[in-house]
Image (tube, coloured by chain):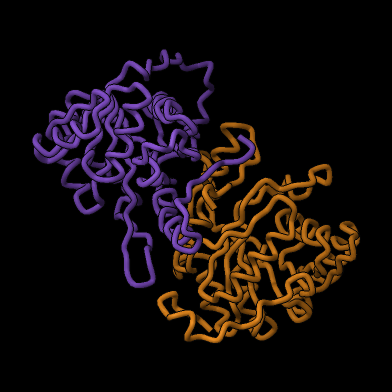
Chain colours: A purple, B orange
Amino acid sequence: MTQPESVNPAAVAAPAPLDVPSLVVGVLGGTGDQGRGLAYRLAKAGQQVVIGSRTAERAEAAAAELGLGVRGADNAACARESDIVIVAVPWDGHAATLEALREELAGKIVVDCVNPLGFDKQGAYALKPEEGSAAQQAAALLPDSRVTAAFHHLSAVLLQDAAIDEIDTDVMVLGDDRAATDAVQALAARIPGMRGIYAGRLRNAHQVESLVANLISVNRRYKAHAGLRITDV
Amino acid sequence: MTQPESVNPAAVAAPAPLDVPSLVVGVLGGTGDQGRGLAYRLAKAGQQVVIGSRTAERAEAAAAELGLGVRGADNAACARESDIVIVAVPWDGHAATLEALREELAGKIVVDCVNPLGFDKQGAYALKPEEGSAAQQAAALLPDSRVTAAFHHLSAVLLQDAAIDEIDTDVMVLGDDRAATDAVQALAARIPGMRGIYAGRLRNAHQVESLVANLISVNRRYKAHAGLRITDV
């Protein structure tokens, strides 16, 4: 599945790109601010979305609030019914949630958007997971899934604000599986204003996750909802 | 010198902001691509610039090539003659260079722009300095200097290209000394196209330094000279 960048591309049969608009997107932790914001934007863009939560009732309530055809289910059913599964759970519950869903997530494209951060009176700071990053922890726990990392730098406030039509941010997409990162880039591009930009392998996910600590400092200093654009691309 | 953000600003006498255009900027490692590019842009913007190198001869030769009133000196003289000193040496020589300049750099604003990276056949990856980041290593080695971190995400190719008038990038400025980060932000803003954006304390420098590994992946995939813009600021 993993394809080193040094392989001659002509020597590898390119798989047909996935038809992303037809895929079902699950959002684990879809009742949190970030997950709900992403679910809203993707559903608004025409994607089929299933929100996952620990209990089906909470997920269904959040889905009903969002409308737009969003469904709710417990995490296991959400993972089973989805083709692409966004992991938007708190860092605290990250390992336990994924470990319990190993079978349901087998073969799926998993998109980790979790930012392991600590907070004290000086603000936010990066936590370093033993595996290197949240995304690498996901890859270690889900050996049969196609793990990518993306959607770290989005403002949950802007995502959830129905008065905002375009999200002025690029999405850095990381992963070692080209077809999977291509699909996640295409998914990000469905949201008006967003682009999905390939930004390296999973081993370089830690700094992308941690950069949220810096964006929190930016937001505090400038009273902003900061995002990132990549120039010259 | 360090002023916690939680202190009531009204209770602290605000120092007069530094008159940045009148300050002399030194560039340690000014004969390397990144250092030379920064020296060129700052001199072009009207700043007095001194390039530092291990030997005065090499520094003077590089300065003569740049023109624009840029001077060259050995590292110690460069540090002594400058008010703001940009550290653009290779990560390999970072600790040794700074340790040797502790006295010359006392009281100065030091701007670390070094990215500790390793390279293998899969590309670049982040190295984690024992102190947390290159900038924190600088702060540990230079207890009497005002250490900041900035200018990490600039393309040396674009900086050095005389045909390009504007550099389409924001500069994340980090540090625990507000007057120092304000001065570095003002310095960045002297270069057309650039803004200096405060992006947190030194303890959050590692991810900003490491993100260059991701920009290298972007450059490789898109044949670009990628930079970053912060949106909503």
Number of labels in the image equals 0
Residue A205 percent across, percent down from the top left: 41, 46
Q: Is residue B22 left or right of residue B121?
A: right
Quarter-of-image position of residue A39: top left
Q: Is residue B68 left or right of residue B105?
A: right
In percent of width and height, residue A1 lies at 35, 26
Q: Is residue B226 left or right of residue A45?
A: right
Q: Is residue B136 above or below residue A56?
A: below
Q: Quadrant of the C terminus of chain A?
A: top right
Q: Residue at image x 13%, y 28%?
A: A77
A78 over B178 or under it: above or below: above
Residue A33, position as x, y percentages in the image: 28, 45
Foreground of the two, A48 or A187: A48
**Residue B31 visible, this orientation:** no
Query: Which quarter of the figure has residue B57?
Result: bottom right
In screen coordinates, is A228 left or right of B57?
left
Q: Residue furthest front?
A: A163
| Residue at (54, 65) in percent of width and height | B174
Query: Whole-percent x and y of residue B127?
Result: 48, 57
In this rendering, the answer to whether A178 lies above or below B23 is: above
| Residue B217 visible within the image | yes
Along the line of sight, the residue nearer the viewer: B27 or A33 = A33
